[in-house]
Amino acid sequence: MRIVVQEPAFDIGAETAAFASGRHDMGAIVTFTGVVRDDTGTLDHLEIEHYPGMTERAITAIADEARTRWSLGDVLVIHRHGCLAPGAPIMMVATCAPHRADAFAAAEFLMDYLKSRAPFWKKEVTRDGAAWVAAKDADEDALTRWKG
Amino acid sequence: MRIVVQEPAFDIGAETAAFASGRHDMGAIVTFTGVVRDDTGTLDHLEIEHYPGMTERAITAIADEARTRWSLGDVLVIHRHGCLAPGAPIMMVATCAPHRADAFAAAEFLMDYLKSRAPFWKKEVTRDGAAWVAAKDADEDALTRWKG
Amino acid sequence: MIDVLYFAWVRERIGLPKEKVETSAATVADLVAELSAREERYALAFSDTSALRVALDQDLSDFDAPLAGVREVAFFPPMTGG
Amino acid sequence: MIDVLYFAWVRERIGLPKEKVETSAATVADLVAELSAREERYALAFSDTSALRVALDQDLSDFDAPLAGVREVAFFPPMTGG
Protein backbone atom coordinates (compact mmCIF):
# COMPACT_ATOMS: atom_id res chain seq x y z
CA MET A 1 0.00 0.00 0.00
CA ARG A 2 1.35 3.41 -0.93
CA ILE A 3 -0.23 6.74 0.06
CA VAL A 4 1.38 9.88 -1.35
CA VAL A 5 0.33 13.48 -0.70
CA GLN A 6 2.50 15.88 -2.64
CA GLU A 7 2.68 19.19 -4.45
CA PRO A 8 4.70 18.16 -7.56
CA ALA A 9 3.18 16.57 -10.64
CA PHE A 10 3.29 12.79 -10.93
CA ASP A 11 3.67 10.63 -14.03
CA ILE A 12 0.43 8.69 -14.64
CA GLY A 13 2.06 6.32 -17.10
CA ALA A 14 5.07 5.54 -14.91
CA GLU A 15 2.90 5.11 -11.80
CA THR A 16 0.49 2.80 -13.64
CA ALA A 17 3.33 0.73 -15.10
CA ALA A 18 5.06 0.42 -11.72
CA PHE A 19 1.82 -0.53 -9.98
CA ALA A 20 0.96 -3.14 -12.64
CA SER A 21 4.38 -4.78 -12.87
CA GLY A 22 5.04 -8.25 -11.51
CA ARG A 23 1.43 -9.11 -10.62
CA HIS A 24 1.35 -12.85 -11.29
CA ASP A 25 -1.52 -13.55 -8.92
CA MET A 26 -3.66 -10.46 -9.64
CA GLY A 27 -5.79 -10.69 -12.78
CA ALA A 28 -7.29 -7.20 -12.58
CA ILE A 29 -5.76 -3.74 -12.27
CA VAL A 30 -7.95 -0.61 -12.15
CA THR A 31 -6.73 2.98 -12.16
CA PHE A 32 -8.61 6.22 -11.77
CA THR A 33 -7.02 9.56 -12.58
CA GLY A 34 -8.66 12.89 -11.75
CA VAL A 35 -7.75 15.81 -13.99
CA VAL A 36 -8.32 19.58 -13.54
CA ARG A 37 -11.30 20.25 -15.75
CA ASP A 38 -12.02 23.54 -17.45
CA ASP A 39 -15.53 23.44 -18.94
CA THR A 40 -15.85 27.09 -19.68
CA GLY A 41 -12.33 27.96 -20.78
CA THR A 42 -12.08 30.62 -18.05
CA LEU A 43 -10.15 28.67 -15.41
CA ASP A 44 -6.68 29.97 -14.76
CA HIS A 45 -5.78 27.39 -12.14
CA LEU A 46 -7.05 25.35 -9.23
CA GLU A 47 -5.66 25.79 -5.72
CA ILE A 48 -5.86 22.73 -3.54
CA GLU A 49 -5.48 23.22 0.20
CA HIS A 50 -5.14 20.30 2.58
CA TYR A 51 -4.65 19.48 6.26
CA PRO A 52 -1.14 18.01 6.58
CA GLY A 53 -1.11 15.06 8.93
CA MET A 54 -4.86 14.46 8.88
CA THR A 55 -4.77 13.99 5.09
CA GLU A 56 -2.41 11.00 5.19
CA ARG A 57 -4.27 9.64 8.22
CA ALA A 58 -7.70 9.90 6.55
CA ILE A 59 -6.53 8.38 3.25
CA THR A 60 -4.84 5.51 5.07
CA ALA A 61 -8.06 4.80 6.99
CA ILE A 62 -10.07 4.78 3.73
CA ALA A 63 -7.56 2.46 2.04
CA ASP A 64 -7.51 0.14 5.07
CA GLU A 65 -11.30 -0.04 4.97
CA ALA A 66 -11.18 -0.94 1.25
CA ARG A 67 -8.75 -3.75 2.03
CA THR A 68 -11.07 -5.23 4.64
CA ARG A 69 -14.06 -5.07 2.28
CA TRP A 70 -12.50 -6.58 -0.84
CA SER A 71 -9.82 -9.09 -1.67
CA LEU A 72 -7.13 -6.73 -2.90
CA GLY A 73 -3.50 -7.27 -3.75
CA ASP A 74 -2.48 -3.65 -3.37
CA VAL A 75 -3.72 -0.07 -3.21
CA LEU A 76 -2.09 3.16 -4.41
CA VAL A 77 -3.37 6.68 -3.72
CA ILE A 78 -1.58 9.82 -4.93
CA HIS A 79 -3.16 13.22 -4.25
CA ARG A 80 -1.65 16.60 -5.05
CA HIS A 81 -2.09 19.97 -3.39
CA GLY A 82 -1.04 23.48 -4.41
CA CYS A 83 -1.63 25.24 -7.74
CA LEU A 84 -2.74 23.07 -10.66
CA ALA A 85 -3.30 24.16 -14.26
CA PRO A 86 -6.23 22.94 -16.41
CA GLY A 87 -5.49 19.45 -17.72
CA ALA A 88 -3.09 18.64 -14.88
CA PRO A 89 -3.61 15.35 -13.02
CA ILE A 90 -4.92 16.05 -9.50
CA MET A 91 -4.86 12.56 -8.10
CA MET A 92 -4.88 8.90 -8.92
CA VAL A 93 -6.03 5.70 -7.32
CA ALA A 94 -4.97 2.19 -8.34
CA THR A 95 -6.19 -1.17 -7.10
CA CYS A 96 -5.38 -4.73 -8.04
CA ALA A 97 -7.27 -7.90 -7.21
CA PRO A 98 -7.57 -11.48 -8.43
CA HIS A 99 -10.97 -10.59 -9.94
CA ARG A 100 -12.19 -7.50 -11.74
CA ALA A 101 -15.33 -6.89 -9.67
CA ASP A 102 -13.23 -6.37 -6.52
CA ALA A 103 -10.72 -4.09 -8.24
CA PHE A 104 -13.51 -1.91 -9.70
CA ALA A 105 -15.57 -1.75 -6.50
CA ALA A 106 -12.55 -0.84 -4.38
CA ALA A 107 -11.46 1.92 -6.78
CA GLU A 108 -14.95 3.44 -6.78
CA PHE A 109 -15.15 3.18 -2.99
CA LEU A 110 -11.79 4.93 -2.63
CA MET A 111 -12.88 7.73 -4.95
CA ASP A 112 -16.24 8.23 -3.22
CA TYR A 113 -14.58 8.50 0.19
CA LEU A 114 -11.63 10.61 -0.97
CA LYS A 115 -14.13 13.12 -2.39
CA SER A 116 -15.91 13.78 0.90
CA ARG A 117 -13.77 12.37 3.72
CA ALA A 118 -10.19 13.36 2.94
CA PRO A 119 -9.36 16.93 4.03
CA PHE A 120 -8.80 18.68 0.71
CA TRP A 121 -10.45 21.89 -0.46
CA LYS A 122 -10.47 23.20 -4.01
CA LYS A 123 -10.52 26.84 -5.03
CA GLU A 124 -11.12 27.82 -8.65
CA VAL A 125 -9.20 30.87 -9.79
CA THR A 126 -10.64 32.32 -13.00
CA ARG A 127 -10.01 35.58 -14.78
CA ASP A 128 -13.14 36.89 -13.00
CA GLY A 129 -12.02 36.01 -9.49
CA ALA A 130 -11.64 33.10 -7.11
CA ALA A 131 -14.26 30.85 -5.52
CA TRP A 132 -14.15 27.80 -3.26
CA VAL A 133 -15.71 24.74 -4.87
CA ALA A 134 -18.84 23.75 -2.94
CA ALA A 135 -19.30 20.15 -1.88
CA LYS A 136 -22.02 18.44 -3.92
CA ASP A 137 -24.96 16.62 -2.37
CA ALA A 138 -24.33 13.93 -5.00
CA ASP A 139 -20.89 13.27 -3.51
CA GLU A 140 -22.34 12.80 -0.03
CA ASP A 141 -25.14 10.64 -1.49
CA ALA A 142 -22.52 8.47 -3.22
CA LEU A 143 -21.37 7.24 0.19
CA THR A 144 -24.75 5.74 1.05
CA ARG A 145 -24.29 2.85 -1.38
CA TRP A 146 -21.37 1.59 0.71
CA LYS A 147 -23.37 1.54 3.94
CA GLY A 148 -25.64 -1.03 5.56
CA MET B 1 -11.96 5.81 -30.21
CA ARG B 2 -9.19 3.28 -30.72
CA ILE B 3 -9.70 -0.50 -30.96
CA VAL B 4 -6.56 -2.62 -31.23
CA VAL B 5 -6.39 -6.41 -31.57
CA GLN B 6 -2.79 -7.57 -31.70
CA GLU B 7 -0.37 -10.34 -30.82
CA PRO B 8 2.56 -8.26 -29.46
CA ALA B 9 2.79 -6.95 -25.92
CA PHE B 10 1.64 -3.38 -25.27
CA ASP B 11 3.02 -0.86 -22.79
CA ILE B 12 0.39 -0.16 -20.09
CA GLY B 13 2.18 2.93 -18.85
CA ALA B 14 2.69 4.45 -22.29
CA GLU B 15 -0.90 3.66 -23.35
CA THR B 16 -2.31 5.15 -20.15
CA ALA B 17 -0.17 8.29 -20.47
CA ALA B 18 -1.11 8.76 -24.13
CA PHE B 19 -4.82 8.24 -23.39
CA ALA B 20 -4.76 10.68 -20.47
CA SER B 21 -2.79 13.45 -22.14
CA GLY B 22 -4.42 16.71 -23.14
CA ARG B 23 -7.82 16.09 -21.54
CA HIS B 24 -8.83 19.59 -20.48
CA ASP B 25 -12.56 18.88 -20.51
CA MET B 26 -12.51 15.36 -19.05
CA GLY B 27 -12.20 15.20 -15.27
CA ALA B 28 -12.12 11.41 -14.96
CA ILE B 29 -9.96 8.74 -16.58
CA VAL B 30 -10.44 5.06 -15.75
CA THR B 31 -8.25 2.19 -16.95
CA PHE B 32 -8.64 -1.54 -16.53
CA THR B 33 -5.82 -3.94 -17.29
CA GLY B 34 -6.25 -7.71 -17.38
CA VAL B 35 -3.19 -9.79 -16.56
CA VAL B 36 -2.50 -13.53 -17.05
CA ARG B 37 -3.02 -14.94 -13.59
CA ASP B 38 -1.30 -18.03 -12.25
CA ASP B 39 -2.94 -19.01 -8.96
CA THR B 40 -1.38 -22.41 -8.64
CA GLY B 41 2.10 -21.78 -10.00
CA THR B 42 1.61 -24.49 -12.65
CA LEU B 43 0.67 -22.32 -15.63
CA ASP B 44 3.21 -22.35 -18.42
CA HIS B 45 1.30 -19.98 -20.69
CA LEU B 46 -2.10 -18.93 -21.94
CA GLU B 47 -3.09 -19.29 -25.59
CA ILE B 48 -5.68 -16.82 -26.80
CA GLU B 49 -7.49 -17.62 -30.02
CA HIS B 50 -9.76 -15.11 -31.72
CA TYR B 51 -11.95 -14.64 -34.80
CA PRO B 52 -10.20 -12.06 -37.00
CA GLY B 53 -12.69 -9.61 -38.46
CA MET B 54 -15.51 -10.42 -36.06
CA THR B 55 -13.31 -9.46 -33.10
CA GLU B 56 -12.81 -5.86 -34.22
CA ARG B 57 -16.45 -5.68 -35.29
CA ALA B 58 -17.76 -6.96 -31.93
CA ILE B 59 -15.49 -4.70 -29.86
CA THR B 60 -16.45 -1.67 -31.95
CA ALA B 61 -20.14 -2.45 -31.40
CA ILE B 62 -19.59 -2.74 -27.62
CA ALA B 63 -17.64 0.53 -27.51
CA ASP B 64 -20.29 2.31 -29.63
CA GLU B 65 -22.97 1.09 -27.23
CA ALA B 66 -20.97 2.44 -24.27
CA ARG B 67 -20.73 5.82 -25.99
CA THR B 68 -24.49 6.00 -26.44
CA ARG B 69 -25.13 5.05 -22.80
CA TRP B 70 -22.69 7.43 -21.10
CA SER B 71 -21.22 10.84 -21.75
CA LEU B 72 -17.69 9.80 -22.71
CA GLY B 73 -14.81 11.73 -24.18
CA ASP B 74 -13.00 8.72 -25.56
CA VAL B 75 -12.67 4.92 -25.41
CA LEU B 76 -9.61 2.71 -25.86
CA VAL B 77 -9.64 -1.10 -26.09
CA ILE B 78 -6.51 -3.19 -26.63
CA HIS B 79 -6.79 -7.00 -26.65
CA ARG B 80 -4.01 -9.45 -27.38
CA HIS B 81 -4.11 -12.93 -28.86
CA GLY B 82 -1.47 -15.66 -29.15
CA CYS B 83 0.78 -17.07 -26.39
CA LEU B 84 0.97 -15.09 -23.14
CA ALA B 85 3.16 -15.84 -20.13
CA PRO B 86 1.96 -15.51 -16.50
CA GLY B 87 2.00 -11.84 -15.46
CA ALA B 88 1.67 -10.59 -19.05
CA PRO B 89 -1.01 -7.98 -19.77
CA ILE B 90 -3.83 -9.56 -21.83
CA MET B 91 -5.90 -6.50 -22.52
CA MET B 92 -6.76 -3.03 -21.38
CA VAL B 93 -9.70 -0.69 -21.51
CA ALA B 94 -9.62 3.05 -20.91
CA THR B 95 -12.46 5.55 -20.70
CA CYS B 96 -12.61 9.24 -20.00
CA ALA B 97 -15.61 11.37 -19.10
CA PRO B 98 -16.40 14.72 -17.51
CA HIS B 99 -17.55 12.86 -14.37
CA ARG B 100 -16.20 9.79 -12.61
CA ALA B 101 -19.45 7.81 -12.42
CA ASP B 102 -19.69 7.71 -16.22
CA ALA B 103 -16.04 6.74 -16.69
CA PHE B 104 -16.33 3.90 -14.14
CA ALA B 105 -19.67 2.58 -15.42
CA ALA B 106 -18.48 2.58 -19.04
CA ALA B 107 -15.25 0.74 -18.17
CA GLU B 108 -17.15 -1.94 -16.25
CA PHE B 109 -19.70 -2.26 -19.07
CA LEU B 110 -16.91 -2.69 -21.63
CA MET B 111 -15.25 -5.37 -19.49
CA ASP B 112 -18.48 -7.28 -18.88
CA TYR B 113 -19.28 -7.36 -22.59
CA LEU B 114 -15.73 -8.08 -23.75
CA LYS B 115 -15.72 -11.13 -21.44
CA SER B 116 -18.73 -12.80 -23.02
CA ARG B 117 -19.46 -11.09 -26.35
CA ALA B 118 -16.09 -10.59 -28.04
CA PRO B 119 -14.85 -13.72 -29.85
CA PHE B 120 -11.80 -14.70 -27.81
CA TRP B 121 -11.10 -18.10 -26.31
CA LYS B 122 -8.48 -18.88 -23.69
CA LYS B 123 -6.57 -22.12 -23.32
CA GLU B 124 -4.44 -22.76 -20.25
CA VAL B 125 -1.28 -24.73 -20.92
CA THR B 126 0.18 -26.17 -17.72
CA ARG B 127 2.90 -28.73 -17.11
CA ASP B 128 0.09 -31.30 -16.79
CA GLY B 129 -1.57 -30.53 -20.12
CA ALA B 130 -3.82 -28.02 -21.83
CA ALA B 131 -7.46 -27.10 -21.20
CA TRP B 132 -9.85 -24.54 -22.64
CA VAL B 133 -11.09 -22.08 -20.04
CA ALA B 134 -14.83 -22.56 -19.52
CA ALA B 135 -17.12 -19.53 -19.59
CA LYS B 136 -18.42 -18.69 -16.13
CA ASP B 137 -22.11 -18.30 -15.32
CA ALA B 138 -21.04 -15.24 -13.31
CA ASP B 139 -19.76 -13.58 -16.48
CA GLU B 140 -23.06 -14.13 -18.26
CA ASP B 141 -24.93 -12.97 -15.14
CA ALA B 142 -22.82 -9.79 -15.09
CA LEU B 143 -24.54 -8.68 -18.31
CA THR B 144 -27.99 -8.64 -16.73
CA ARG B 145 -27.23 -5.50 -14.73
CA TRP B 146 -26.91 -3.53 -17.99
CA LYS B 147 -30.30 -4.65 -19.29
CA GLY B 148 -33.81 -3.33 -18.84
CA MET C 1 -21.24 -22.40 -51.09
CA ILE C 2 -20.68 -20.93 -47.65
CA ASP C 3 -17.56 -20.61 -45.53
CA VAL C 4 -17.87 -22.52 -42.26
CA LEU C 5 -15.41 -21.59 -39.49
CA TYR C 6 -14.62 -23.41 -36.26
CA PHE C 7 -12.88 -22.00 -33.18
CA ALA C 8 -11.37 -23.27 -29.91
CA TRP C 9 -12.41 -26.83 -29.00
CA VAL C 10 -14.88 -27.00 -31.88
CA ARG C 11 -11.96 -26.46 -34.24
CA GLU C 12 -9.92 -29.08 -32.40
CA ARG C 13 -12.68 -31.71 -32.44
CA ILE C 14 -13.50 -31.22 -36.11
CA GLY C 15 -9.82 -30.97 -36.94
CA LEU C 16 -9.86 -27.93 -39.19
CA PRO C 17 -10.36 -24.18 -38.81
CA LYS C 18 -12.37 -23.54 -41.95
CA GLU C 19 -13.99 -25.24 -44.90
CA LYS C 20 -16.28 -24.46 -47.79
CA VAL C 21 -19.61 -26.26 -47.61
CA GLU C 22 -22.10 -26.85 -50.41
CA THR C 23 -25.47 -26.81 -48.70
CA SER C 24 -29.10 -26.01 -49.20
CA ALA C 25 -29.81 -25.98 -45.44
CA ALA C 26 -32.54 -23.48 -44.58
CA THR C 27 -31.38 -22.78 -41.04
CA VAL C 28 -28.28 -23.07 -38.88
CA ALA C 29 -29.85 -26.10 -37.18
CA ASP C 30 -30.31 -27.77 -40.59
CA LEU C 31 -26.64 -27.12 -41.41
CA VAL C 32 -25.61 -28.60 -38.05
CA ALA C 33 -27.70 -31.71 -38.83
CA GLU C 34 -26.08 -32.06 -42.27
CA LEU C 35 -22.56 -31.71 -40.86
CA SER C 36 -23.25 -34.09 -37.94
CA ALA C 37 -24.44 -36.73 -40.42
CA ARG C 38 -21.10 -36.57 -42.27
CA GLU C 39 -18.67 -38.01 -39.75
CA GLU C 40 -18.30 -38.90 -36.10
CA ARG C 41 -16.00 -35.92 -35.38
CA TYR C 42 -18.74 -33.49 -36.51
CA ALA C 43 -21.39 -35.38 -34.55
CA LEU C 44 -19.15 -35.15 -31.48
CA ALA C 45 -18.47 -31.43 -31.91
CA PHE C 46 -22.17 -30.65 -32.37
CA SER C 47 -23.54 -33.15 -29.83
CA ASP C 48 -24.69 -30.41 -27.47
CA THR C 49 -25.49 -27.18 -29.30
CA SER C 50 -26.52 -25.53 -26.01
CA ALA C 51 -22.78 -25.45 -25.29
CA LEU C 52 -22.10 -23.71 -28.61
CA ARG C 53 -22.51 -20.27 -30.11
CA VAL C 54 -22.98 -19.38 -33.76
CA ALA C 55 -22.16 -16.24 -35.73
CA LEU C 56 -23.59 -15.43 -39.17
CA ASP C 57 -21.43 -13.09 -41.22
CA GLN C 58 -19.62 -12.16 -38.00
CA ASP C 59 -22.69 -11.29 -35.94
CA LEU C 60 -23.83 -13.49 -33.06
CA SER C 61 -27.00 -15.35 -34.02
CA ASP C 62 -29.17 -18.36 -33.11
CA PHE C 63 -29.40 -21.95 -34.25
CA ASP C 64 -32.88 -21.38 -35.65
CA ALA C 65 -31.77 -18.43 -37.78
CA PRO C 66 -32.23 -18.73 -41.58
CA LEU C 67 -29.13 -19.14 -43.76
CA ALA C 68 -30.48 -17.37 -46.84
CA GLY C 69 -27.86 -14.89 -48.10
CA VAL C 70 -25.32 -15.82 -45.43
CA ARG C 71 -21.73 -16.21 -46.67
CA GLU C 72 -19.90 -17.08 -43.44
CA VAL C 73 -21.03 -19.25 -40.54
CA ALA C 74 -18.85 -19.71 -37.46
CA PHE C 75 -19.26 -22.20 -34.62
CA PHE C 76 -17.50 -21.82 -31.29
CA PRO C 77 -17.89 -22.31 -27.53
CA PRO C 78 -19.00 -19.44 -25.25
CA MET C 79 -16.42 -16.68 -25.43
CA THR C 80 -13.84 -16.12 -22.71
CA GLY C 81 -12.24 -12.80 -23.52
CA GLY C 82 -11.15 -10.00 -21.25
CA MET D 1 -4.16 25.38 25.72
CA ILE D 2 -5.31 23.80 22.47
CA ASP D 3 -4.28 24.35 18.88
CA VAL D 4 -7.17 25.58 16.73
CA LEU D 5 -6.77 25.26 12.96
CA TYR D 6 -8.85 26.80 10.18
CA PHE D 7 -8.97 25.74 6.52
CA ALA D 8 -10.35 27.02 3.22
CA TRP D 9 -12.93 29.83 3.57
CA VAL D 10 -13.01 29.44 7.36
CA ARG D 11 -9.30 30.33 7.37
CA GLU D 12 -9.93 33.24 5.02
CA ARG D 13 -12.82 34.66 7.06
CA ILE D 14 -11.01 34.39 10.39
CA GLY D 15 -7.81 35.61 8.76
CA LEU D 16 -5.36 33.10 10.17
CA PRO D 17 -4.59 29.40 9.68
CA LYS D 18 -3.85 28.48 13.27
CA GLU D 19 -3.83 29.84 16.80
CA LYS D 20 -3.40 28.68 20.38
CA VAL D 21 -6.54 29.09 22.48
CA GLU D 22 -6.83 29.09 26.26
CA THR D 23 -10.21 27.61 26.94
CA SER D 24 -12.19 25.61 29.46
CA ALA D 25 -14.96 24.84 26.95
CA ALA D 26 -16.50 21.44 27.61
CA THR D 27 -17.56 20.74 24.02
CA VAL D 28 -16.79 21.86 20.48
CA ALA D 29 -20.04 23.88 20.50
CA ASP D 30 -18.90 25.67 23.66
CA LEU D 31 -15.58 26.52 22.00
CA VAL D 32 -17.41 27.83 18.92
CA ALA D 33 -19.57 30.06 21.21
CA GLU D 34 -16.46 31.41 22.96
CA LEU D 35 -14.70 32.17 19.67
CA SER D 36 -17.82 33.74 18.11
CA ALA D 37 -18.11 36.08 21.12
CA ARG D 38 -14.58 37.39 20.52
CA GLU D 39 -14.93 39.27 17.26
CA GLU D 40 -17.19 39.74 14.27
CA ARG D 41 -14.91 37.74 11.93
CA TYR D 42 -15.28 34.67 14.17
CA ALA D 43 -19.04 35.16 14.50
CA LEU D 44 -19.24 35.38 10.70
CA ALA D 45 -17.13 32.26 10.14
CA PHE D 46 -19.19 30.25 12.65
CA SER D 47 -22.60 31.72 11.81
CA ASP D 48 -23.86 28.45 10.29
CA THR D 49 -22.14 25.42 11.80
CA SER D 50 -24.25 23.09 9.65
CA ALA D 51 -22.00 24.29 6.79
CA LEU D 52 -18.89 23.36 8.78
CA ARG D 53 -17.03 20.24 9.74
CA VAL D 54 -14.80 19.73 12.77
CA ALA D 55 -11.89 17.37 13.42
CA LEU D 56 -10.51 16.56 16.86
CA ASP D 57 -6.88 15.45 16.88
CA GLN D 58 -7.22 14.84 13.12
CA ASP D 59 -10.32 12.65 13.26
CA LEU D 60 -13.69 13.89 11.98
CA SER D 61 -16.02 14.57 14.89
CA ASP D 62 -19.20 16.44 15.88
CA PHE D 63 -19.98 19.81 17.38
CA ASP D 64 -21.39 18.20 20.51
CA ALA D 65 -18.23 16.15 21.14
CA PRO D 66 -16.37 16.76 24.44
CA LEU D 67 -13.01 18.57 24.31
CA ALA D 68 -11.44 16.82 27.32
CA GLY D 69 -7.93 15.65 26.40
CA VAL D 70 -8.08 17.11 22.88
CA ARG D 71 -4.94 18.93 21.74
CA GLU D 72 -5.90 19.98 18.21
CA VAL D 73 -9.26 21.20 16.89
CA ALA D 74 -9.76 22.00 13.20
CA PHE D 75 -12.69 23.79 11.55
CA PHE D 76 -13.33 23.64 7.81
CA PRO D 77 -16.05 23.45 5.16
CA PRO D 78 -17.17 20.11 3.68
CA MET D 79 -14.24 18.52 1.89
CA THR D 80 -13.85 18.59 -1.88
CA GLY D 81 -11.02 16.19 -2.65
CA GLY D 82 -10.60 13.70 -5.45
Image: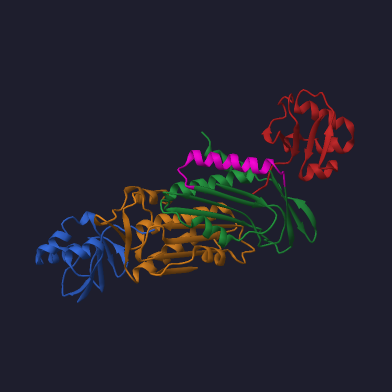
Chain colours: A green, B orange, C blue, D red
Image height check: is A144 above or below B143? above
Residue A64 is covered by the magenta coloring: yes
Is residue C70 among what the camera can see? Answer: no
Residue range corresponding to the magenta coloring? A50-73
Left or right? Give the position of A35 relative to B30.
Answer: right
The percent position of residue D23, horizontal first and vertical second, equals 83, 26
Give the main secondary structure of the magenta stretch: helix
Tell me if D1 is positioned left or right of C28 in this view: right
- Position of A101 with respect to D48 (left or right) is left
Above or below, B132 against B7 in this view is above
Residue drawn at 57 percent across, 43 percent down: A142
Q: Quick check: can you spot residue D44?
A: yes
Q: Is residue C19 above or below residue B135?
A: below
Could you say which is closer to the camera, residue B45 or residue B48? B45
Q: How many marks?
A: 0
Q: Which is nearer the eye, D67 or B116?
A: D67
Q: What residue appears at the point 65 percent right and 43 percent down from the top-left corner?
A: A56
Residue B111, how many percent across, how many down? Answer: 43, 56
